[in-house]
Image: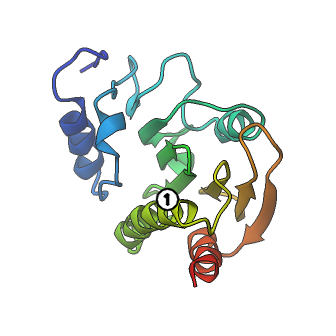
Amino acid sequence: MNESPQSPKPLEAARHLIQGAGLPMPPIPKNISKNLFRPEETNYFTSRVNTPGPWSLGWFLEEVEYGNPQNYVMIGIDGHGQESSATHFYLVEEDIAFFHQSQMVSPANPKLETSLSDQYDLMAIIAVATAQAKENGQMAKDSRLIIVRPAFRQAFWGLQPTPGHPIDWKDAEDALLDASSWLATRMY
């Protein structure tokens, strides 16, 4: 079933795809979810046109570091065969950007991550806390917190001082927890 930007209820279709694969649904802001559609012959949904699929993580990271993309979300499953399929959740807003991947079940990876739902919950908390920190002057108004958690590489995160400027990247064992801890120190 292919979706177009005008198709009814694309958020429900995305939820069906994700939950049908045994995955929890990540937090998708309502103002962005209304633009979701499913590109032809894919297993993911996006609110953007003319982008590569979610497996092209480098393209999305380069765009956010050197450009200033409009708010968007990309969610779904993509990969190059059973061993390299992953679930993808990319969310870019003015205050925050998440690029999160999680390896799908395969012979080499027989179980889904049990903490995936907790990770998505933490992302929602980080997004709200980042907006509050900026509103309270605890983070620079034009800055963006960026958290990257690839399925097959080291996680990292960083703070972008203003859109289009280089990001001060930090490697992390758990980028969500490290960025969350950094943010907590800014707020107290």
x then y, percent, for residue 72: 47, 35
Q: Please, is residue 83 above or below residue 73 in the view?
A: below
Q: Residue at 39% of width from left, 20% of height from top?
A: 41
Q: Is residue 146 left or right of residue 27?
A: right
Q: Please, is residue 188 above or below residue 79 in the view?
A: below
- Under mark 1, the amino acid is Ala
The quarter of the picture where the N terminus appears is: top left
- 137 or 109, which is in the foreground? 137
Q: Secondary structure at mark 1?
A: helix
x then y, percent, for residue 176: 56, 70
x then y, percent, for residue 80: 57, 37
Say few, some or many: other residues with alpha carbon within 10 Å of mark 1 (under 14 / 14 to 19 / 20 or more).
some
Q: Residue at 35% of width from left, 24% of height from top?
A: 38
Determine which quarter of the picture holds residue 150.
bottom right
x then y, percent, for residue 109: 50, 64
Determine which quarter of the picture holds residue 163.
top right
Q: Please, is residue 61 above or below residue 143 in the view?
A: above
> Tag count in the figure?
1
In the rendered image, which residue does mark 1 sit on? 131
- 50 or 33, which is in the foreground? 33
Q: Is residue 39 visible?
A: yes
Q: Is residue 111 visible?
A: no
Q: Residue at 68% of width from left, 38% of height from top?
A: 64
The quarter of the picture where the C terminus appears is: bottom right
Display coloring: rainbow
Q: Residue at 57% of width from left, 78% of height from top?
A: 187
